[in-house]
Image: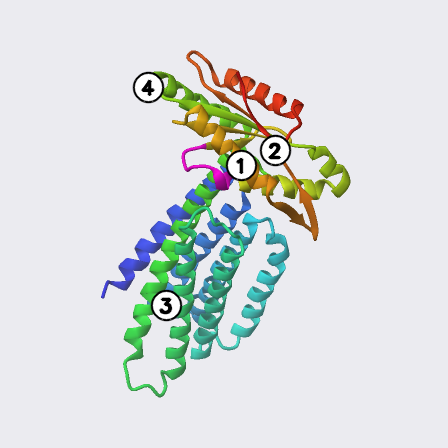
Amino acid sequence: MMHLPTIIIISIILNSIISSFLMSLYVLRKQKTYLYWCISCFIFVFAQVTAALRAFIDLDFVSHYLADLFIIAAPLAAILGIHAYNSTDKTKFTACIGVLLASAIILLPIYSSPFGQLYTTTVIACCFCYAAYALNKLHLGRITHFLLLQICFVVHAILMFCQAALLLSAPTSVIDTQQALAIILISHIVISTCTALVWPVLMFLESEQVLTDLANLDPLTGLLNRRAFLNLSATHLEQAHGCQKELCALMIDIDFFKKVNDKFGHETGDEALKWVAKQIQAQLREHDIVARIGGEEFAILLPNTSENNAHALSERIRLAINNQQFIYNQQSISLSLSIGVIKHSAGSNINDLLAQADKGLYQAKHNGRNQVVVAI
């Protein structure tokens, strides 16, 4: 088994470095989640230092009572850090302080007895269970590595419950519980340090992803926005020119959409836009590019696609909307699309291409809507 003092020293050094890194992130980003986790790491360092003093001084109030309070406070600060990501830390702050104060009162008469360690272990286990639950409520589905952090919390909780069970059985147990408790202690230190390291990395990645989404995605439909579509389409158009490949663009508009908003309300209109976006995406291939570029306007770029195939795909999109009813709040609404199609020509840029597709779109509207027109 690894040397416990060595593990404690390494953990203290790593947690000190991590807490300093978290503080720098807080200063840079002004996100309180980093501040709370910085505090959690510092508290965990204090907990290890005060607990380690048991080997040098005979002062139970410091090496047991204060150490136990620090050990309880560390996961409570981490929980506040999780809630701070969704700005709900204020509603949880009082509860966490209440748990810490209650622990301070309960531990005062029992901190030097085995019951003090049992109580501390049980509270920590409950804290990690709640941390796993709180992390799950964040709904951070874009980064699957958050599952790793959740597993760390669950494993940590299981270890603490196992430690509590060993402490309860110690007086009557025939096995050497001290060896098992030592292993659990080492695991507790290692997992705490790993968790402290993983959290800021994941939060930083999540924050960067949010900023990227804000810059490139339409917040309502989740499709690309106009800026991102133009940038990405320009690259594909250059490749089509250079490799002499076929490429087509579509401009799509929902017919009489203003009447939907006026009759059913803007909430229904927003849901209709999301429904249309999903129906359009369902008809496209993996490499096709679709964006919402205006109120009820969508644009699609079709790389490696002939004019005939672009027309056929446009018809599938039109029929997918025309042949279904959009249903919301028990209301059935008929929608239709007008679509303009254009094939790229040598020397054209993306703005020229969309302008030509737009001419086809307006011709479709002029002809009576709910149809596809190939621009000439």
- Near mark 2 (Cα within 10 A), the count class, few <14, some 14-19 or many ≥20, is many
Q: Amino acid at mark 1?
A: Ile
Between tags 4 and 2, which lies in front? 2
Using the image as rendered, state which of residue 119 and residue 138 is in the foreground: 138
What segment carries the magenta color? 280-288
Query: Which residue is found at the position 50% from the left and 21% from the top?
Result: 342
| Residue 181 versus residue 286 in the image, above or below | below
Residue 162: name its quadrant.
Answer: bottom left
Q: Split into 4 quadrants, where in the image is the N terminus? A: bottom left
Q: Position of residue 374 (x, y in %)?
A: 53, 22
Residues under labels 1 and 4: Cα distance? 28 Å
Looking at the image, tell me whether mark 3 or mark 1 is earlier in sequence order. 3
Proximity of marks 2 and 1: CB atoms separated by less than 8 Å? yes
Q: Amino acid at mark 4?
A: Cys
- Near mark 3 (Cα within 10 A), the count class, few <14, some 14-19 or many ≥20, is some
Residues under labels 2 and 1: Cα distance? 8 Å
Question: What residue would you read off at disc 1?
Answer: 317
Q: Position of residue 243 (x, y in %)?
A: 33, 19
Residue 235: name its quadrant.
Answer: top left
Question: What residue would you read off at disc 4?
Answer: 243
Q: Amino acid at mark 2?
A: Leu
Question: What residue would you read off at disc 2?
Answer: 337
Between tags 3 and 1, which lies in front? 1
